[in-house]
Amino acid sequence: MGNALSNLVKLLQNSPIEDFQSILAQAKVTAKDVQGHCFFSDQYYTRNLVCADKHFELIVLCWRGKQRTPIHDHNNSEGWLKVVEGKVTETIYEWDKILKKANLQNTISHVELEPGGTSHVNDDMGVHTICNPSTQDSITLHLYAPRIEKCHYVDTKNASIKEKILGFYSIAGKPQADS
């Protein structure tokens, strides 16, 4: 783990959740710092766990060009992201978290984030999707508090909401057997 990444983890472990957004925004994490957690797949974006404790988890996501998440919630977790390399877009849609229903006709925000750019979302703000709009690889750092072990996503083919148990392509730099 690169020095900047190790320092970020230590700082998060010793800080209240209320400070996470500014801590992540100020972190000077580079692609070199996260290289031991970067695993790409041509089929889908990958989720690579850096560390987790009872308060948060820190994950490196690796994106090939044009890869995207489904539209999803965060199952009552706060979620922050920081672009390390490349760029991503984030689109947030209206979400009724009690009924677990998304209004895809109502886009709350759509932003393009470049290296150093950050974003924050939670279920009160809406559901979102993240996409690498380019043909180049992108790397993003994601912080969730508390840990997010499952989420709900919009199955656009069936116009339904489904639940997904979340896993990792790698944990602490080691690819998982079922990844």
Image (cartoon, rainbow, N blue to C red):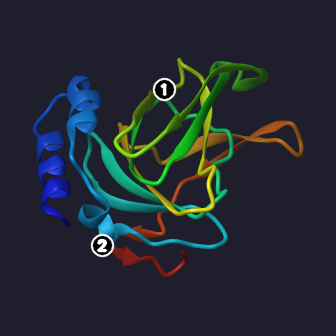
The quarter in which the N terminus is drawn is bottom left
Residue name at image x 37 percent, y 54 percent: 59
Q: Height in image: 134 above or below 11?
A: below
Distance between mark 1 and mark 2 Cα atoms: 28 Å
Give the image location of residue 4, x and y in percent. Answer: 16, 54
Return the disc, 1 or 2, that comes first in the chain's sequence.
Answer: 2
Extreme residue in the right direction = 158
Extreme residue in the bottom direction = 177
* Left or right: residue 54 compared with residue 75: left
Residue 14 sits in which quadrant?
top left
Residue name at image x 88 percent, y 46 percent: 157
Residue name at image x 30 percent, y 42 percent: 56
Question: What residue would you read off at disc 1?
Answer: 122
Determine the secondary structure under disc 1.
loop
Residue type, label 1 = Asn
Q: Quick one: 153 or 59, which is closer to the camera?
A: 59
Q: Residues within 10 Å of mark 1 (few under 14, many from 20)?
A: some
Residue name at image x 82 percent, y 37 percent: 160
Give the image location of residue 39, x and y in percent. Answer: 45, 72
Q: Nearer the viewer, mark 1 or mark 2?
A: 2
Q: Height in image: 76 above or below 27?
A: above
Q: Quick one: 110 or 48, which is closer to the camera?
A: 110
Residue type, label 2 = Gly
